[in-house]
Image (tube, rainbow, N blue to C red):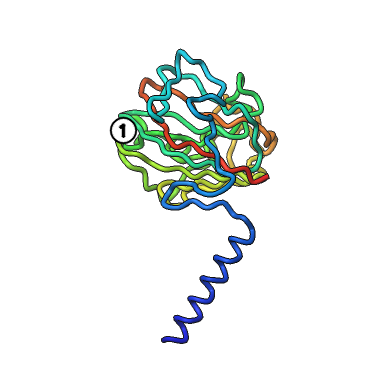
Amino acid sequence: MKKIQFILFFLFITIVLQVSAQNTPVVVQGQPMGKGWKNLFGNNLSKAIYDKSIWKDSSGVITASKDDAIWSFDEYDDFILDLDFQNADGTNSGVIVHATDIVEWIPNSVEIQIADDYSKQWSKAAPTWQCAAIFGRKPATNKSLKPAGEWNHFTITCKGKMISIVLNGTLVNECNMDDFTSAKVNPDGSSVPSWLKNPMSTLGLRGHIGLQGKHAGAPIYFKNVNVFKLS
């Protein structure tokens, strides 16, 4: 038994040293730490592209009064995005990545869905419309979504054509954009919404990161929105 414990301890130390040597970004208990992490939108939204009449930062909590997106000033391709979000009753929102066009962003980006899956409307929605789905394309699994009024945590990693989504500490979705070659039918046979007119495999990677505002009549709240560039 002692020999097994020693071997396991040795393997743990080896992994820790390898991670440290590779300068891998660290997220501890859902909060990023260490060199390289930064506030995506800057202090008081100073590094964001947004409508000041719609989006507000109140003591670090960001919310919108209308269905309008807020965008990072900088563009990213490979990155880790770490944030907290809180749904209201009936919330429908999203995190937008790889947005090469922030005006016509819907067909020119990938949206990680945020929804109040406990609500009457979204509990009955198609799985690709529910929380942590790659919207319209791939549903989440093993979800650990908290109900409206409680804070949830996303860690979203985009590297090359791969996207991974961790919700409240659980890996709930992984996606290879190259697998989605049709604008009409997903690999699992489900239909792609007509407004997603560009196959995901054809989308550009370097683009803005955004958050969708008040959509479908219910608000959404964000805080601790931090990013780590991988390249």
Residue at the spot 61% in from the left edge and 20% down from the top edge: 104
Residue at the spot 62% in from the left edge and 55% down from the top edge: 23
Front residue of this view, candidates 24 and 211: 24
Front residue of this view, candidates 186 and 114: 114
Rendered image quadrant of residue 146: top left
Residue at the spot 58% in from the left edge and 66% down from the top edge: 17
- Please tell me whether residue 159 is drawn above or below residue 194 in the rendered image: below
Residue 83 in view = yes
Rendered image quadrant of residue 208: top right
Residue tagged 1: 119
Callout 1, which amino acid? Ser
The quadrant of the image that shows the C terminus is: top right
| Label 1 neighbour load within 10 Å: few <14, some 14-19, many 20+ | some
Front residue of this view, candidates 189 and 114: 114
Where does residue 60 sit, x and y in percent of width and height?
41, 30
Where does residue 182 sit, x and y in percent of width and height?
65, 36
Farthest residue, direction top: 53
Count of numbered labels shown in the rendering: 1
- Please tell me whether residue 12 is drawn above or below residue 106 in the rendered image: below
Question: Position of 37 compared to 115: left or right?
Answer: right
The quadrant of the image that shows the N terminus is: bottom left
Residue at the spot 51% in from the left edge and 23% down from the top edge: 69
Question: Position of 148 compared to 101: left or right?
Answer: left
Question: Position of 183 compared to 171: left or right?
Answer: right
- Please tell me whether residue 198 is drawn above or below residue 139 in the rendered image: above
Residue 187 in view = no
Badge 1 element? loop
Front residue of this view, candidates 48 and 94: 48
Where does residue 48 sit, x and y in percent of width and height?
55, 25
